[in-house]
Image: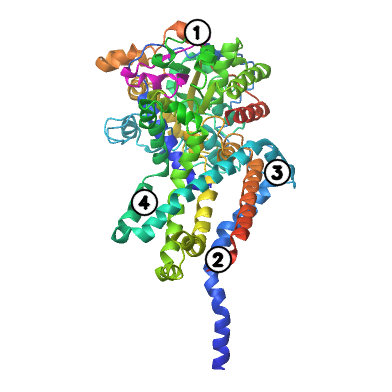
């Protein structure tokens, strides 16, 4: 009897453990998604009234795609470039902090995080001042007469930093780079230093040791960092709004305009869905390429 | 994604709005009409569907409490931001009437308030927490058209007679029986002479290729399209769809050509201050409050400027309609209106404010001479209010405009 009851308890335990998480997902993910999907397939007979009719209007999706294709492409391009920049900046930094910083490790980690105690918005507005026509960044370039050079290599457009696509991508990179550094740092920090010693003992060059030992072991961190960077960056619209121009609008601002300015909830919901679907597919493909067994480790 | 950012964005809008309200004039030379709001306001009313009933429908006649939703920095307060500190309008009102006022600065954006608050609540036949809210005129016209407001209890508002005459003839509510204007203002052009090398006169100067990529327009449809219509020689108060589309074509082309750098809300002020743009469409009082050393100038274009006003409405079924009426009566007393004007420095819709300010003397009297608050007749004659659009037209135009503004 006692054995049976403990067995039953054992069977129930996983469900009990998964319960809170599932409840959370159902309440705050599945239910809203269901509502969103219903709205995406509805029509609003009167734009000013809050009522919908579920008419299975799939055309909301095609309408949204054809109307907002440029913004969709732009969002993913900007987010993609920003994510790559985040890896290029974040990985060496995380590597340094994990392996070379010694007793300054905690201090350096703290310094990386400190700017993020300030509001996202305030930090982005600060970039307006830094990048502006009379700001310090352009001031240095002008003093060195380098503006034509930076124009040529695409860092500036027509002698301006601010209100360019470069500024938007730069803003995205800056705002999300910490989300790249931290996961990579965690995965690097976990690596047993003796593995690298072993590689050295086996006559591996430092470069080969990095490529064959450190890099593969840190990939889960890169993967997590990529997700944490790319997804919010693609959905972000503050950077595009504050640092970009009329030709750098991203998908987030279009969804918000559809909701708030045009009262077109169905198309806004459809556009949100399309956006999430593309991201989900992208993440699955990415996970497949990077190898999921690495990630479960 | 948007949910995460939304509160911050709302806070920023509020901050920007607060700035703009605070910045509003004191110095500056130019004009726009307080005493006489634009002749545009007088536009063909034609419709005679006056509905005297309405106040008897539903809702409460409460006269003990009052809840008001307003834009930020839109009423006098003490230095710590207390609305009901001794000597403020709200404190005096509470003292004189015994009505407890809940005053919230939660009206950030017309469309946002409509889509997040009005439509989901009033559209479902439920009651709003606020007894008075204060949208801009075109939103007020929409809400009145949807019949989501109560008739004002005019018996409780003898000071209704102090309303400037121009407001009595609006097509969407002849006689102003459902709304009472709070404050008004004007939209024109601003420029940085160091960047432009001279003064601008016309709205079409913003389309001059000399300033390519150094010009910003406003995301506010009626301001941007309305001024462009003036430049095209068409009448923004007529709301003729062909004319609106022609103006939109012009804006779209200028956007594609790179003439217009971006469309902004209050952020254009930072761009002007930082020297990132040469010229822009701007709200009058904002510019007056910029540091004079920057030399930024503002004018109503020679073709004309846009006029706007925010107006008090009582939502359908509001619990405290008597209290709301008494509040309106109170702020339409010229003395009380003058105190609000002194603080917010917009164009007051209340007759007798100029005289009340002059009588106060000192800074207040100086304000009475400010042409931005009390403009001369010539300026007033050049200001117009954007015409009323039908619901379908409004959505079509707004949707096209949204595509242009990126």
Which picture quadrant has residue B357? top left
Circle 1/circle 2 CB separation < 8 Å: no
Q: Nearer the viewer, residue B24 or A70?
A: A70
Q: Locate residue B346 relative to residue A50 in the image: left or right.
A: left
Mark 1 belongs to chain: B
Residue A36: percent from left, percent from top: 63, 50
Residue B229: percent from left, percent from top: 59, 15
- The stretch of residues the image draws in magenta is B276-304
The answer as to whether the residues below labels 3 and 2 share one chain is yes
> Which residue position holds label 4?
A112
The answer as to whether the residues below labels 1 and 2 share one chain is no
Which mark's residue is nearer the viewer, 4 or 3? 4
Which picture quadrant has residue B399? top right
> Callout 2: 10 Å neighbours few (<14), some, many (20+)?
some
> Callout 4: 10 Å neighbours few (<14), some, many (20+)?
some
Q: Nearer the viewer, residue A66 or B171?
A: A66
Mark 2 belongs to chain: A
Q: Which color mode does the image show?
A: rainbow
- Is residue A278 placed above or below A3 in the rendered structure? above
> Which residue position holds label 2?
A294
Residue pushed farthest top? B378
> Callout 1: 10 Å neighbours few (<14), some, many (20+)?
some
Marks 2 and 4 sit apart, C-alpha to C-alpha, by 27 Å
Marks 1 and 2 sit apart, C-alpha to C-alpha, by 69 Å
């Amino acid at each position: 009897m006692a054995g049976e009851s403990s067995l039953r308890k054992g069977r129930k335990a996983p469900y009990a453990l998964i319960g809170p998480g599932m409840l959370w997902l159902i309440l705050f993910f599945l239910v809203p998604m269901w509502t969103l999907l219903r709205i995406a397939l509805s029509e609003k007979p009167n734009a000013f009234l809050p009522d919908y009719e579920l008419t299975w209007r799939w055309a909301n999706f095609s309408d949204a795609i054809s109307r907002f294709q440029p913004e969709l492409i732009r969002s993913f391009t900007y987010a993609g470039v920003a994510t790559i920049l985040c890896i290029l900046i974040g990985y060496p930094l995380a590597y340094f902090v994990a392996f070379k910083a010694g007793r300054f490790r905690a201090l350096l980690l703290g310094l990386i995080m400190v700017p993020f105690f300030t509001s996202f918005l305030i930090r982005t507005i600060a970039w307006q001042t830094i990048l502006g026509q009379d700001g310090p960044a352009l001031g240095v370039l002008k003093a060195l007469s380098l503006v034509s050079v930076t124009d040529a290599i695409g860092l500036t457009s027509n002698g301006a930093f601010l209100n360019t696509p470069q500024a938007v991508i730069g803003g995205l990179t800056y705002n999300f780079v910490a989300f790249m550094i931290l996961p990579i740092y965690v995965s690097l920090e976990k690596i047993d230093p003796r593995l690298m010693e072993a590689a050295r003992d086996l006559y591996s060059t430092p470069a080969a040791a990095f490529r064959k030992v450190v890099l593969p072991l840190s990939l889960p961190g890169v993967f997590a960092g990529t997700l944490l960077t790319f997804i919010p960056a693609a959905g972000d619209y503050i950077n595009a709004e504050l640092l970009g121009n009329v030709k750098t609008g991203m998908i987030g601002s279009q969804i918000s305009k559809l909701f708030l300015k045009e009262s077109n909830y169905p198309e806004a919901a459809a556009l949100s869905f399309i956006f999430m679907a593309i991201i989900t597919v992208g993440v699955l493909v990415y996970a497949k390429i990077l190898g999921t067994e690495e990630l479960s480790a | 994604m948007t949910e995460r950012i939304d509160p911050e964005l709302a806070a920023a809008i509020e901050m920007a709005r607060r700035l703009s309200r605070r910045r509003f004039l004191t110095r500056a030379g130019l004009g726009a009409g307080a005493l006489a709001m634009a002749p545009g306001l007088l536009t063909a009313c034609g419709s005679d569907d006056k509905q005297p009933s309405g106040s008897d429908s539903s809702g409460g006649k409460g006269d003990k409490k009052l809840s008001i939703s307003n834009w930020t920095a839109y009423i006098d307060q003490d230095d710590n931001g207390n609305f009901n500190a001794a000597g403020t309008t709200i404190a005096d009102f509470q003292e004189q009437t015994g009505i407890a006022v809940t005053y919230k600065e939660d009206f950030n954006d017309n469309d946002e308030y409509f889509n997040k608050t009005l439509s989901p609540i009033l559209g479902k036949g439920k009651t709003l927490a606020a007894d008075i809210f204060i949208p801009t005129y075109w939103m007020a016209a929409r809400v009145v058209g949807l019949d989501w407001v109560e008739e004002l209890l005019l018996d409780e508002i003898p000071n209704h007679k102090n309303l400037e005459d121009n407001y009595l003839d609006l097509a969407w509510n002849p006689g102003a029986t459902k709304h009472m204007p709070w404050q008004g203002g004007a939209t024109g052009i601003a420029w940085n002479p160091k960047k432009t090398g001279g003064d601008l006169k016309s709205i079409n100067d913003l389309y001059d290729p000399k300033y390519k990529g150094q010009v910003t327009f406003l995301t506010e449809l009626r301001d941007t399209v309305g001024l462009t219509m003036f430049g095209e020689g068409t009448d923004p108060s007529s709301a003729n769809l062909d004319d609106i589309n022609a103006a939109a074509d012009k804006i779209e082309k200028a956007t594609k050509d790179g003439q217009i750098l971006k469309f902004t809300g209050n952020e254009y002020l930072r761009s002007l201050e930082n020297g990132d743009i040469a010229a822009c469409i701007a709200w009058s009082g904002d510019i007056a409050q910029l540091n004079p050393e920057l030399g930024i100038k503002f004018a109503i274009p020679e073709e004309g400027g846009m006029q706007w006003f925010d107006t008090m409405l009582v939502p359908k079924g509001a619990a405290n309609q008597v209290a709301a009426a008494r509040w309106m009566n109170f702020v339409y007393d010229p003395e009380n209106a003058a105190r609000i004007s002194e603080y917010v420095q917009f164009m007051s819709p209340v007759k007798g404010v100029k005289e009340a300010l002059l009588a106060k003397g000192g800074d207040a009297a100086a304000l009475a001479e400010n042409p931005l608050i009390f403009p001369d007749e010539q300026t007033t004659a050049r200001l117009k209010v954007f015409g009323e659009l039908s619901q379908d037209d409004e959505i079509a135009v707004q949707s096209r405009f949204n595509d242009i503004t990126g």
